Amino acid sequence: MSSSTHPAPTSLRAQAYESFQQQIVDANIRPGQFVSQRELMQLLGMPLGAVRELIPRLEAEGLLKTVPQRGLQIAHVDLKLINNAFQLRLLLERRRPAVL
C-alpha cells in the first residue's frame, strides 16, 4: 500500500486539532458543553483514534476537561481570546525559519 492512501497519524492529529479550533470559532462547540468522544468524532469529521489522541492535548491546553460520569466538557473560555491565540500561533508557525 502506498502512503498516499493512508494519511500519516501526525497529519490526522493536526487535522483534528484544526477542526476543533474551527468548531470553537464557528460556535458549533460551546463553552461548558458536554460531548462524548463519539459526538466529538462526528463534529470534527475525524476517526475515533484521532479524537482519542487529540483529547490529552486539548486537556493540556485547558480547552477540554474530562468529567467522570458526564463526558468531555468544553472549557469556559473567552472565545475572542482563543481565536486571537489561534491566529497568533498560525502566524508564528508560518514565520518559523526552516530547519537546516
Image (cartoon, rainbow, N blue to C red):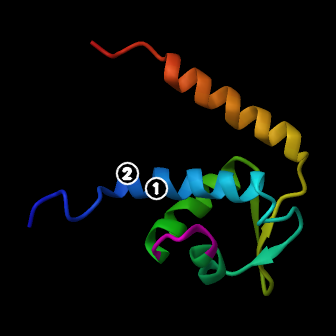
Residue at 59% in and 78% down: 42
Q: Is residue 93 above or below residue 11?
A: above
Q: Is residue 48 left or right of residue 78?
A: left
Q: Are the residues tagged 1 and 2 within 8 Å (C-beta)?
A: yes
- Residue 48 image offset from top left, x and y in percent: 48, 76
* Bounds of the magenta segment: 43-47
In the rendered view of the protein, which quadrant contains the N terminus?
bottom left
User: Residue at 35% of width from left, 15% of height from top?
Assistant: 98
Does the magenta segment cover residue 69?
no
| Residue 93 tag number | none
Q: Looking at the image, which is closer to me, 100 or 3?
A: 3
Q: Position of residue 68 (x, y in %)?
A: 77, 81
Quadrant of residue 24 within the rendered picture: bottom right
Residue under numbered circle 2:
10
Callout 2 secondary element? helix
Residue 63: in sight, yes or no? Answer: no
Q: Give me the C-alpha separation between circle 1 and circle 2.
A: 5 Å
Q: Is 38 displayed left or right of 74 in the figure?
A: left
Q: Position of residue 47 (x, y in %)?
A: 45, 74
Q: Which residue is mark 1?
A: 13
Q: Tell me the kind of residue under disc 1.
A: Arg
